[in-house]
Each structure stands twice: as C-alpha cells, then as structure tokens.
C-alpha cells in the first residue's frame, strides 16, 4: 500500500496519527465535538443508558493521492452515528466509488477480507495477553501502565453479566451432578402464527435424568397438540451403550448400539454392506467422559505455549505526543503506551500455532466426530477444514505491528488504534493492509460506551467491521445494546448484527432481542422471561414467557415454555432383551423398515 493512503481523522491536529481512509462530507448539522482516529465520536455520555446506540455505515472512500509530506495535515472526519442523531438523512446511502477504480467490475469474494479482520482482532488480543502475562516482571515502565489498563478493563467486563449464575448456585449444581442424579424437564410449546389448519401449534417435551456417577442417563421424548400427549420414545445410555425404544414404530422392541468399537463393528455389519460405506476401524464414541478434565483445552495450551515468542519480541514505549479525545462533551488530552510486535516473531509464532493445531489430538477428535456424518465425503470435508485453519492463521505481517493504547488519568484504556496502516499478506488471501481504531468512552465505566472498528484493504476494495455499544449497570439491572456491522463500499452488501438485553437483578427477569440483517433478509429473535423456584445449588425453573422468531418483520414462530432442573432419587434401569443393531441381518433390517412404515 502506498504511504499516502491514510486513515484520516476528525482531530483537527496532525499529531493524532495517520490512518487509511478518508470520508465523504456529511450533511450540515452533523459535526461532532469529539473524534476518534477513524471517525468522529460525540458526547457518548449524553445518550440514555437504556437507548440503543444508533449507527449508520461508515462512508469509505480512498484518499486522493498526495505527496507524503502533505499527507499528515489531511484530517477529514469519517462520521459515525451518535445517540439521538444520524449523519445521513433517509435510508443508507451508497458509497461513491473508489477514486481511479474502473466503472464496473465483478464483485470480489470478501472471505479473505473477513479473515484479515479476524487476524487484526487476534493480534490485539495477543498483545493484551502478553502484557498481562508480564505484569509481575516489570515495574514502573510503560508495560506496567498498560497492564494496569488491561486489568481495569477486565474488572469492568466482570460487571457486565447477570447475577443469576450466582443466585441459582450454578457451580454448586454442576458439582452435584458428579455425585447425584439430576432431572431436567423441558416443556416447550411452538405456534405457527401463519398456519390456517387444525394443527397450528404443538408441544415438545423431554424428561431427562442424568447420573454421571453411574455413567447412565435416560431421555423420554413426547409430542402433543391441543391437549393430546403422545410418548414418542425413550433413549437410555448405560456406560457406552445406547438403548432406543419407539413404541409407535417398533412396538415392544428395544434396540441397542455399543459405541466402544463402533468403526470395527459397523464395518462387519450388514448395514455397511447395504449402504456401501465404511468407517475407520478405530472409530469410537465416548458418552461419559471425565467431567473433571481441565477446562482449558489443548487449543488454549497451544496458544499459551507460543505466546512467549511474541511476548519476548514486544517493545513498549511511552507515547510522548498526547492525543485529544472528547468524552461527555469535554475535550481532554491523554497519553499512553505504544506496543510494537516484531513481524518475524509473530509470523513464526502463527505458523507454529497453525501446525500444532492441525497435528493436535483435540483437532483430530473434532474431525473424527464428523466421520460418520460425511462418510465417503469425509476426506474432502477434512481438506476443507484444514484449509480454513490454514487461512485463519495464514495472514502474515510485512512490517512490525504497531498498536497505540491511550489511557485516562484513572488508568482506564480509552482508545486502541494503529497509528498507520499495517502491511499484510496471505498465501491465498488478497489483502494488503489492516488498521484498528476503537474508542472506550463511558463515564462510569470506560466499556459502557464503545465505538470503533477494524479496516482491511485489498487493492481498491475496503472492508470495515464496526462495533457500537452502550451499556448501563445499576444495583437493580444490567442493560446493553450492541451493534456489529461488516460493511463494504457497496452498502447494499452490509451485514449487521444487533443484540440488546435487560437483566433484572431483583427478580431475575430477562428481556433480550437479537437480529441479523443480511442483504435481502432481516431475521430477528426476541424472548423474555425469568428464573424462578430457585433453590441455590439444587435446582431452579427457567420460564420463557414469550419468544418469537421473525423474518422481514413477520413472525414465523412463537414459543413459550419452561425448563426445570432438580435433584432426584431416580434409578435408571437398563432394558433387557435388547436387539443389537449391528448384529442384525439384511432380512432383519428390511423387516425393521417394513414394520416401521406399515
């Protein structure tokens, strides 16, 4: 990327750092008092704590070519929506074409650009982990300042959660499952609001008992409609054998399947000959693993093992030139810490991580779980998954990665940004550079208000992933409004995800909404309810008072129901005289299907 392609900012000062892209001018009356390195941010504190942060797409156009020495003063705002105002009138506006680009051309596949965005986000996380890992090794230097900021951020994040896990004693209840049988009863009712026939709704129920101590479980499934209940069947798991009974199909017969040597037994069965498929000889499934195994997992261990390489390469410096931010309408200048990550150390580390993941036992076990599903297509599926891993960890930096972290006087991180675009490359991904700029501007907690994003550029195409968040935490409730947007230069291709929730601490009520807006379709999910009948550490009832799935503003599914959890004294019995599925002859299999159908 040419040196004069910068992210241009609404700072009015050449000292705020240079970035990638400029913006189109906005309608009068949308000027903002604050700024970020990518776009203007006005008074976030003026927004109501319960109102969602209104956002509109960032307008992306590439800067006109200028001489390097004149590039620094070119600071024009990229406007972003603020609470209570919109930088554009009417619906989303199409972004003008990139200067100098051909008038018409086929659209590119944006998958590579999305990988670039994920890579940039991953690097920020790696730097944060590195700073936290070294907090006890350095005192009184920029790394200590950065570590304090990350610790403050972690402390704030801990406040953004419902208190229900502690109130119901979820940890204690999970421990109890290791020693006592636990019953979970699911009772849901689904309604099709568009149905005109007799059966516009039906009930679905699962009555489950799990006994991890005895390595046994039982699941009774039922369906119903308009007061008519029907027992569909029962599944019993004993150690590593599954027993299935479906009276409406198989009368009194019970069928069993031992999963211990599933690959070998299946290959020697009549089923393999009938469907002309084979499983790996050593293929097996385990129903009751060790619940006391480490929760960390092999993937986390791999990342931690290689983090020391990138950590040792990091250089921490104090930012001498302060940068001005405006929070709550009051401008203030803050300094911070510049973190530089050696490109070679990072690239080598990511290559090692990729290779270790592909060779790991956990990845092997994950893939083996799909062998029965894909049968003859498994090799192709595995090649595709390997390729995905290679791409996710295949982006390489062509220059050292530089990240600026600004902190306020309380030691809170208020901005994370790259002072310039970072040149990158990929073996099969056509990306050239990435840039990051995110503001944390909440007054009580910095993370209450987040505004910013990540940019990726490929030739004359730009992709932006923006985040806009507003949260409020009081003694009575916790609410949050979050918007994520993936945006290209053609706003018709924007993908927007929105999430909002409100938790009541006193009565354990919840009210949440999620939506996904992709080109041509808006899908929404809403639900409200509460946790009731709580006996801490022993059981509770989850009540869904109202739930809805809608597409393009029309409800397509409504649901209500309950999920009850409690300890019980039930004894699960293993069925007698069960028919081993893998010992059935071809005639037995034909009779099974004939009897089930007729």
Image: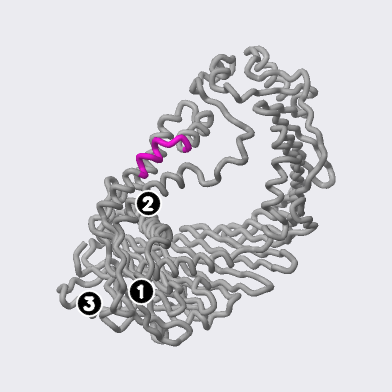
Q: Give the range drawn in magenta.
A: 353-362
Q: Earlier in the sequence, mark 1 or mark 2?
A: 2
Would residue 14 be counted in the magenta stretch? Answer: no
| Residue 361 part of the magenta segment | yes
User: Dots 1 and 2: beta carbons under 8 Å?
Assistant: no
Q: For the residues carrying marks 3 and 2, which lies nearer the camera in this image?
A: 2
Q: Residues within 10 Å of mark 2 (few under 14, many from 20)?
A: many
Q: Position of residue 163 (x, y in %)?
A: 67, 63
The residue that disc 3 covers is 72
Where is residue 185, by image quadrant? top right
Residue 12 appears left or right of 29: left
Query: Under tag 2, what secondary structure?
Result: helix
Mark 1 and mark 3: Cα distance apart in space: 21 Å
Percent x, y of residue 5: 23, 68
Residue at the spot of label 1: 336
Residue 275 appears in the figure: yes
Residue at label 2?
307
């Amino acid at each position: 990327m040419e040196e004069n392609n910068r992210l241009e900012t609404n700072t009015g000062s050449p000292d705020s750092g240079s970035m990638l892209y400029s913006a189109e001018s906005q309608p009068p009356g949308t000027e903002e008092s604050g700024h970020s390195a990518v776009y203007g941010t006005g008074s976030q504190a003026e927004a109501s704590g319960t109102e969602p942060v209104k956002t509109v797409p960032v307008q992306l156009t590439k800067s006109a070519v200028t001489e390097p020495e004149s590039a620094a003063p070119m600071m024009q705002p990229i406007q972003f929506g603020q609470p209570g105002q919109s930088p554009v009138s009417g619906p989303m506006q199409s972004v003008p074409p990139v200067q100098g680009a051909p008038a018409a051309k086929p659209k590119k596949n944006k998958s590579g650009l999305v990988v670039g965005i994920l890579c940039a986000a991953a690097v920020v996380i790696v730097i944060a982990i590195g700073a936290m890992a070294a907090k006890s090794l350095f005192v009184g230097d920029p790394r200590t300042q950065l570590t304090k900021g990350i610790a403050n951020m972690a402390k704030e994040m801990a406040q953004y959660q419902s208190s229900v896990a502690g109130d119901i004693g979820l940890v204690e209840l999970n421990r109890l499952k290791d020693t006592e049988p636990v019953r979970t009863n699911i009772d849901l009712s689904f309604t099709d609001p568009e149905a005109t026939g007799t059966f516009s709704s039906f009930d679905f129920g699962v009555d489950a008992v799990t006994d991890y101590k005895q390595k046994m479980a039982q699941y009774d499934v039922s369906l119903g409609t308009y007061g008519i209940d029907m027992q569909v069947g029962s599944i019993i798991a004993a150690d590593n054998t599954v027993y299935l009974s479906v009276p409406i199909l198989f009368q009194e017969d019970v069928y069993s399947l031992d999963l211990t040597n599933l690959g070998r037994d299946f290959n020697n069965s009549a089923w393999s000959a009938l469907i002309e498929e084979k499983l790996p000889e050593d293929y097996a499934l385990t129903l009751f693993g060790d619940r006391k195994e480490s929760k960390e997992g092999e993937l986390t261990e791999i990342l931690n093992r290689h983090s020391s390489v990138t950590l040792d390469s990091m250089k921490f410096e104090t930012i001498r030139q302060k940068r001005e931010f405006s929070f709550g309408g009051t401008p203030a200048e803050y300094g911070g810490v510049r973190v530089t990550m050696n490109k070679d150390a990072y690239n080598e580390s990511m290559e090692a991580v990729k290779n270790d993941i592909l060779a790991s036992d956990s990845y092997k076990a994950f893939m083996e779980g799909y062998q029965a599903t894909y049968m003859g297509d498994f090799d192709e599926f595995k090649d595709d998954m390997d390729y995905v891993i290679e791409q996710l960890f295949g982006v390489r930096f062509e220059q050292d990665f530089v990240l600026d972290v600004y902190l306020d006087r309380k030691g809170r991180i208020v901005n994370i940004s790259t002072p310039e675009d970072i040149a990158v490359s990929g073996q099969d991904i056509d990306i050239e550079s990435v840039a990051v700029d995110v503001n944390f501007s909440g007054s009580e907690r910095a993370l209450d208000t987040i505004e910013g994003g990540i940019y990726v550029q490929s030739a004359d195409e730009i992709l932006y992933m923006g985040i806009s968040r507003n949260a409020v935490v009081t003694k009575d409730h916790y609410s949050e409004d979050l918007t994520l947007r993936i945006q290209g230069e053609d706003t018709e291709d924007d993908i927007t995800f929105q999430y909002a929730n409100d938790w009541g601490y006193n009565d354990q009520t919840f009210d949440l909404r999620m939506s996904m807006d992709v080109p041509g379709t808006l899908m929404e999910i809403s639900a409200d309810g509460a946790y009731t009948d709580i006996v801490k550490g022993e059981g509770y009832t989850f009540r869904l008072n109202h739930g809805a799935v809608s597409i393009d503003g029309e409800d397509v599914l409504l649901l209500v129901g309950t999920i009850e959890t409690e300890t019980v004294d039930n004894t699960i019995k293993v069925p007698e005289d069960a028919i081993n599925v893998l010992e059935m002859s071809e005639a037995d299999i034909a009779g099974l299907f004939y009897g089930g159908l007729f």
